[in-house]
Amino acid sequence: MSRSPPTVLVICGPGNNGGDGLVCARHLKLFGYQPTIYYPKRPNKPLFTGLVTQCQKMDIPFLGEMPPEPMLIDELYELVVDAIFGFSFKGDVREPFRSILSTLSGVTVPIASIDIPSGAGSRRWGLGSGPHSVLRRVPRSLILGSRLRPSRK
């Protein structure tokens, strides 16, 4: 990463994967990165509000809007963390996440996904039924704990 400190956009979804994104942003800050969080649909549950408070107390900025153009994301950030949807996501990708994933499909900076790429759905990964990918990006590497294998019954 060429900037000092390196800039990271962390995009959080409404569920547990979004909570993981908030924790990720907190750790990035502790390790000297400059995270910025976009969290469009915040659940009103103590766990999530507590995580937001922790990030705010660490002076991690929250965006009010998603950068609308992929080029703008490429200019401002060196990495995007996709913490929108995880393994358990089912159903169709709805707004605002459909637009977010569409924008992300045009960025050239690396995208690190928590669990699996958002919108990929379990069908794409051989894990059963789920939505097809909107993001349409395949990770270059997988963390061992996320290695994909056939489901066991």
Image (cartoon, rainbow, N blue to C red):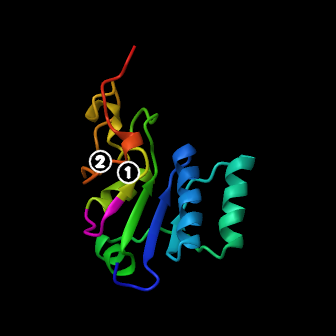
* In this view, 108 is above or below 127: below
Query: Is residue 62 visible to us here?
Result: no
Residue 22 drawn at (x, y percent): 58, 58
Alpha carbon separation for disc pair 2 and 1: 7 Å
Residue name at image x 46 percent, y 50 percent: 84
Residue at the spot 28% in from the left edge and 43% down from the top edge: 133
Apparent side of residue 62 relative to residue 118 in the rendered image (left or right): right
Instruction: Tell me which corner region of the image, top left, top right, bottom left or bottom right, holds residue 52.
Output: bottom right
> Where 123 falls versus 139 (above or below)?
above
| Main secondary structure along the magenta-highlighted residues | loop
Question: Where's residue 44, x and y in %?
Answer: 70, 49
Magenta run includes residue 109? yes
At horizontal 39% and vertical 37% (from top left) the residue drawn is 92
Rendered location of residue 68, percent (x, y) = 38, 70
Place of residue 10 in the rendered image (x, y in percent of width and height, measured from the top left): 48, 63
Q: Is residue 21 visible?
A: yes
Q: Which comes before the other along the chain, label 2 or label 1?
A: 1
Q: What amino acid is found at the position of numbered circle 2 in the picture?
A: Val
Where are the magenta residues, as a range? 106-111
Q: Is residue 34 left or right of residue 118?
A: right
Callouts 2 and 1 close, C-beta under 8 Å: yes
For marks 2 and 1, give the one nearer the viewer. 2
Q: Secondary structure at mark 2?
A: loop
Amino acid found under the numbered disc labelled 1: Arg
- Mark 2 sits on what residue? 134
Outermost residue to the front: 144
Q: In the drawing, does residue 21 fall left or right of residue 100?
A: right
Which residue matches tag 1? 98
Rendered-image quadrant of the C terminus: top left
